[in-house]
Image (tube, grey):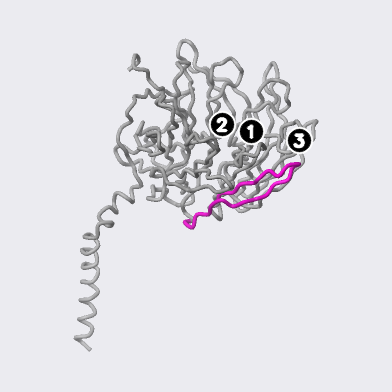
Amino acid sequence: MKWLVISQLLAMLTIPLLTLFSLNHVPAMKELPARIQGGSSFPAASSEWLRETVGPTAVGLPRITNVQVVDLNGDRQNEVLVCDASRNQVLAYELSEQGEWQERVIADQISAPAHATVVDLDLDGDLDVVVSVLGNILPDDGVVGSVVWLENHTNGYIPHTILDNVRRVADVQPADFDADGDIDLTVAVFGYNRGQVLWLENRGAERFREHELLARPGTIHVPVADYDGDGDPDIAAIVSQDEEELWVFENLGAGSFQSRMLHRFFNFDIGSAGLVQTDLDRDGDVDLLLPVGDNLEDANAYPQPYHGCFWFENQGEWVFEAKRISDLGGTYAASACDLDSDEDLDVVLVSMSNDWRTENPASVVCLENDGRQNFSPRQIDSEPSHLVTVDCGDVNGDGLPDIVAGGLHIRSPYSRIGRVAAWLNLRESER
């Protein structure tokens, strides 16, 4: 019995040591530390970028939920449209001739705005703004969300609540879904434990009738496009809460839709973080970009090897082929744009939960396209940290696309805090 106990103790000590030694000689395991980092840093970008702070510098912990580059007032000069959940405002920033960012408040007292959609909702010839209202930026399954239409008038914007008594709303997108000549809306009700995808039928006189397309919690974005090329607008949706699912709703005409699940991730922790429609390969149909890296449900958000970005290439007949095009720990948002003027689309990614305690973690990354959809990751910057939204467009009027991103700071560390930042694309003469 004595020798049996001794042999068991020796086995308990030696087997783990032998296992560790053996695993270190397995080729895949040698790469494990790098894989766990999730691609925390990359080679520097081949072009040069100048970072600027857009609007006021950060006070406290900023909570920017959305940025867009858009010509809001029709003066052929792009502005930066911002949803600020810490100030509960929707704002526009324009770069003056003197190089100063001028702030304009579009809407005030909007409880945790998630997204602002620019559309002429009343078809009167000017651009309105439709705001997706979370009601609470933190997890909440209460009926706190809404959709607010900011009607464009000479002296500002007039708010109209066109949907309430719903859970947290994350996105709203416009189209004439029933082909009756007015603008309808599709709505991503994120909620928390309960959520929906809706389309709102425009009945005139600020009245909208709700139609449910899907009952799922955690819908983030509902990009609208003609995905099947039949001439009418369809709806895509990414669901991220209980399941990790990519859905489309095929427009059958007269306000009727057929739902289709395009893809389901069996890794329920992959962290779908958004959905972007774009013709990435410029073959004439509409593809989808899916950043993955949202792990805010974890007590300590940390980059994972499965974080990054997927390209869902449209193959026709409702077949979308999933292709992983990049790793990046904590990837939270993506934007497609021809950054280097070589006539193909590059992809910009931003990270929310990279390893910010390291010396040079990537916060903004450009995936440089070689023209055949082979993408090389190049690091543009390592700060600010905790970026959750990004867009591309010319913000300084030089004809080159720039990058704008916003930070959401609800997790430590707080050493690289930023609110809204722009990276200006420098011409040869400006370098």
Residue 112 lies in what quarter of the image? top right
What is the secondary structure assignment of the residue under circle 1?
A: strand
Q: Amino acid at mark 3?
A: Asn
Q: Amino acid at mark 2?
A: Cys
Q: Main secondary structure of the magenta part?
A: strand
Magenta segment: 246-267
- Quadrant position of the N terminus in the picture: bottom left
Eyeballing the image, is 70 above or below 316? above
Question: Upstream in the sequence, badge 2 or badge 3?
Answer: 2
Q: Nearer the viewer, mark 3 or mark 1?
A: 3
Pointer 1 with pointer 2, Cβ within 8 A: yes
Residue with the mark numbered 2 = 83
Question: Upstream in the sequence, badge 3 or badge 1?
Answer: 1
Residue with the mark numbered 1 = 131
Q: Position of residue 425 (x, y in %)?
A: 40, 22
Residue with the mark numbered 3 = 202
Q: Position of residue 403 (x, y in %)?
A: 45, 27
- Quadrant position of the C terminus in the picture: top left
